[in-house]
Image: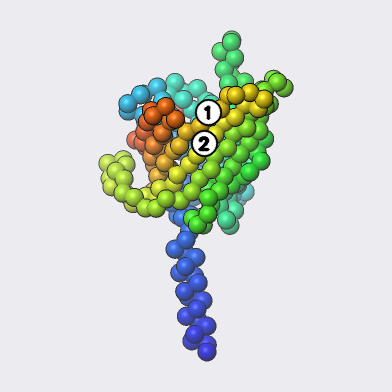
Amino acid sequence: MKYVKQVSIFIIILTFAGCSVKEYYFPMSELTSGKVYKYECKSEPSKTQYWKLTSDLKNQILTTEAYESDFRQYELFKEKITDKGTEVIEFTSYLKNQKGLLLPVYNIPKDVDVFRWNKKEPYKYSAETDYDGKYKTIFSKEREYVGKSKISILGKEHEAIKLKENYKTVVMNSTEKFEYTQYSYYVKGIGLAKMEKEYSDGKKETLELTEIMTIDEWNKKQ
């Protein structure tokens, strides 16, 4: 009886481990001093992005500062690491006004699941925004696990997990709506390594991780 119980526990542990994709997410322990990931769009260089990733191990928070190809910041995103995955705790967009100044726009999180360790069920995060108190916008991103795939990144072939994501932005009390589908690939020890975007008009766009910089290297580009 004791042997059967031990075997049952072992099977449960293996099953749980097999369902978890935590090890494919960004490596928190390697980001305490910050690193910058360059996601290059080779077909349209102006769509290239830079993500500055910094981890706070004490509070289990990952901060992402996202920049356009011209180094203009367009987003600040903070996630709390939990035993189930990561949850958004702060989401700020930066818009350029007529004078060229960046103005912060604070998005209010509603659904909070950014990345879940368990790959069985779809999940999402969403946020509401009021622009000038006139235009209420609702943003949502729903993702689900697709499977494993082989991709070539940074000169090597890696096993990756593939996620399908549906992005939607709706302006309330109007007919304005923007949607697209993205396939994201995550690699162990790296995190997000590749993004394939598919738009409703048939246009496709791929961003690949082509460089990981230290903060000193990043500062020299400014």
Q: Indicate the position of residue 213 as horizontal and vertical percent values.
A: 40, 35
SS state under label 2 = strand
Q: Residue at x 27, y 41 (%)?
A: 155
Nearer-the-camera pick, 211 or 164: 164
Q: How many marks?
A: 2
Q: Is residue 85 left or right of residue 51?
A: right
Residue in the picture at 50% in, 72% down: 12
Residue 119 place in picture, x, y as percent: 49, 55
Q: Are marks 1 and 2 in contact (CB under 8 Å)?
A: yes
In the image, what residue type sits under mark 2? Tyr
Residue at the outermost top position: 99
Label drawn at residue 178:
1
Q: Quadrant of residue 138?
A: top right
Q: Where the C terminus falls, by quadrant? A: top left
Residue furthest to the right = 133
Secondary structure beneath disc 1? strand
Of mark 1 and mark 2, the one earlier in the sequence is 2
The residue type indicated by label 1 comes to: Phe
Provide residue 193's location: percent of width, then percent of height. Answer: 39, 42
Q: Is residue 208 left or right of residue 88?
A: left
Side of 199 relative to 98 (left or right): left
Dot 2 corresponds to which residue?
A: 167
Q: Residue at x 40, y 48 (%)?
A: 162
Q: Is residue 74 visible?
A: yes
Residue neighbourhood size for the residue with mark 2, other residues' Cα within 10 Å, grouped as few (<14), some (14–19), many (≥20): some
Residue 26 screen position, x and y as percent? 47, 46
